[in-house]
Image: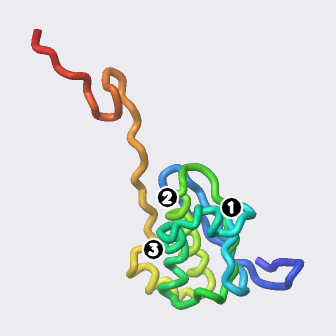
Amino acid sequence: MLNPQQNKIIYSGTGRRKTSIARVQIIPGSGKLIINGLPGESYLQFSPNYLRISCTPLNILGLNKEYDIYVKAEGGGLTGQADAIRLGLARALCSINPENRFMLKSEGLLSRDARIKERKKYGLRKARKAPQYSKR
């Protein structure tokens, strides 16, 4: 897709994890990360772990300072959102160059983590925790 204001091509990808959804757009630029209108560092609370997780696909391909990343993240917490951003970014990088797919796939960055919270069942306290058994 072409950005009409800057005449630059926008590549996009969607990532999901737990209940989080991240819509990622990357544009050739200087390497800044913007999440929901805030700088990535402040949105992810200056956590080096979340920042490292979010930018893993760029680090593997060696494209750290070549693309600006714009993210619309919603739902869940910061862990789920960071993992969703990682998946969306990996998918967007695959749309730039299909040769990126092999390296990202071998690192496991193109697989969606399907683990979600198990629902609570009636008669139990949580999904699997049962009340204490009383013999008499």
Q: Secondary structure at mark 3?
A: loop
Q: Secondary structure at mark 2?
A: helix
Q: Residues within 10 Å of mark 1 (few under 14, many from 20)?
A: some
Q: Is residue 37 left or right of residue 108?
A: right
Percent x, y for residue 28? Answer: 72, 86
Q: Which residue is mark 3?
A: 109
Any part of residue 86 in sight: no
Q: Residues within 10 Å of mark 3 (few under 14, many from 20)?
A: many
> In this picture, is 120 found above or below 108?
above
Q: Give the camera-side residue of 121 and 81.
A: 81
Q: Which residue is mark 1?
A: 72
Comparing marks 3 and 2, which lies closer to the viewer?
2
> In this picture, is 70 found above or below 63?
above
Q: Give the camera-side residue of 12 and 36.
A: 36
Q: Residue at x 72, y 64 (%)?
A: 38
Q: Give the camera-side residue of 125 and 123.
A: 125
Q: Residue at x 47, y 69 (%)?
A: 49
Tell me if label 1 and label 2 are in contact, CB under 8 Å: no
Callout 3 amino acid = Leu
Tell me if label 3 and label 1 are in contact, CB under 8 Å: no
The Cα atoms of the two marked residues, 3 and 2, are separated by 15 Å
Q: Residue furthest top?
A: 136
The Cα atoms of the two marked residues, 1 and 2, are separated by 15 Å
